[in-house]
Amino acid sequence: MKLAIKKIEFVPAAKFRSFRHLSANSYCNINSLLLSGEFIEIDHTQETFSLTEEWTNDSSGKFSTVDASFSIRSYPLISEPFLFYLSRVRTIFRLTACNGEKMIIGSPEFRANITFKKQITGLSTYEFLVTITCKSTHGIIYDTTE
């Protein structure tokens, strides 16, 4: 599905309580599970966002695969080392749609993997094409935090 996403945020998964009690595509006040810290916003290019969720059944149960793809223009704070860091730590992402709906990708139990590719867009400018992928039993969690 194509969504207009106005905000992408992240926080290390170690700052959360377990998500084990959450069922598939459940609603939750995510801040009630946050032990410390707060979400940090990632500046992105709004025109280039897509989100897909696919459910599959196999011998070990029912799983959701969530893929979120977007572009980030290069800024001093958004760099290859920063994205490399995000790709190495267990991270939870929160996406906020223009309609106000907040979606969580990843959990302390299920790692959200991030991959990125640098794309040259001009003589001295570039952007990163970023994909977040998470396979889990709970799928997208809808955040009811105000």
Image: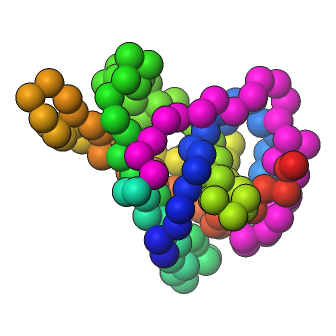
Q: Is residue 110 visible?
A: no
Along the line of sight, the residue nearer the viewer: 113 or 51? 51
Residue 27 is inside the magenta segment = yes
Q: Is residue 120 visible?
A: yes
Mostly what secondary structure, the magenta segment?
A: loop
Along the line of sight, the residue nearer the viewer: 47 or 95? 47
Q: Residue at x 57, y 44 (%)?
A: 8
Q: Residue at x 12, y 35 (%)?
A: 122
How many circles with numbers are drawn on the protein?
Answer: 0
Q: Position of residue 117 (x, y in %)?
A: 24, 41
Question: For this view, does 114 lie left or right of residue 17?
Answer: left
Q: Position of residue 94 (x, y in %)?
A: 64, 47
Magenta residues span 20-46
Report the colour scheme: rainbow
When the figure is inspected, residue 117 is found, relative to residue 21, above or below; the finding is above
Q: Residue at x 63, y 29 (%)?
A: 40
Q: Position of residue 137 (x, y in %)?
A: 65, 66
Q: Quadrant of residue 76?
A: top left
Question: For this view, does 109 lie left or right of residue 91?
Answer: right
Direction right: furthest residue: 32
Q: Position of residue 123 (x, y in %)?
A: 9, 29
When the figure is inspected, residue 53 is found, relative to residue 97, above or below; the finding is below
When the figure is inspected, residue 8 is found, relative to residue 141, above or below; the finding is above
Q: Residue at x 85, y 57 (%)?
A: 144
When the figure is inspected, residue 117 is found, relative to residue 85, above or below; the finding is below
Direction top: furthest residue: 76
Q: Quadrant of residue 84?
A: top left
Residue 88 is inside the magenta segment = no
Direction left: furthest residue: 123
